[in-house]
Amino acid sequence: MFSGILLTTDAAAANPYGGVIMVVYIILIVAFVYFFMIRPQKTEQKKKNAMLGSLEVGDSVLTTAGFYGVVIDIADDTVIVEFGNNKNCRIPMQKSAIVQIEKAGSAVEESSK
């Protein structure tokens, strides 16, 4: 019975920095998760919010479904997009469904060069 107690005290005495090393490992794992998972996701979210904030009527957009359209009207979190040449094909959708925006003036500027 006493030999078990002696073995545990001997193991603790053999590595006095065991607790410090464990804390360092936990800090390294948390830092890894932050810099390689959380931080890039936050920067992507900031880019998307900035892109959606610059959305204007007349811009060409690409949706998550792969459809190209032109923005007709903008509300708080929804937009009305016109698809194709048919003026009757106007669909309201969430702003978050927009993946890419092409400004209305950029195509005119490129064609004039």
Image (cartoon, helix red, strand yellow):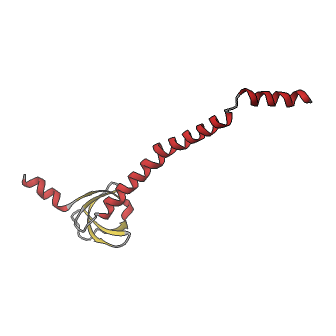
Q: Is residue 26 left or right of residue 106?
A: right
- Quarter assignment of residue 92: bottom left
Q: The N terminus is located in which quarter? A: top right
Q: Is residue 91 left or right of residue 18?
A: left
Residue 4 seen anywhere in this rendered image of the structure: yes
Residue in front for this viewpoint, 89 or 22: 22
Please report the residue visible at 64 percent of the width from the left and 37 percent of the height from the top: 20
Residue in front for this viewpoint, 56 or 21: 21
- Quarter assignment of residue 97: bottom left
Residue 13 lies, in percent from the top left, at 75, 29
Please report the residue visible at 49 percent of the width from the left and 46 percent of the height from the top: 34
Please report the residue visible at 33 percent of the width from the left and 69 percent of the height from the top: 79
Residue 42 lies, in percent from the top left, at 43, 53
**What is the residue that sits farthest to the right in this orientation?**
1
Residue 55 lies, in percent from the top left, at 28, 64
Q: Is residue 64 left or right of residue 107?
A: right
Instruction: Tell me if residue 12 comes above or below residue 33 in the rendering.
Output: above
Please report the residue visible at 73 percent of the width from the left and 26 percent of the height from the top: 14
- Quarter assignment of residue 65: bottom left
Instruction: Tell me if residue 105 comes above or below residue 36 in the rendering.
Output: below
Residue 64 seen anywhere in this rendered image of the structure: no
Instruction: Tell me if residue 5 comes above or below residue 50 in the rendering.
Output: above
Q: How many marks?
A: 0
Residue 59 lies, in percent from the top left, at 23, 63
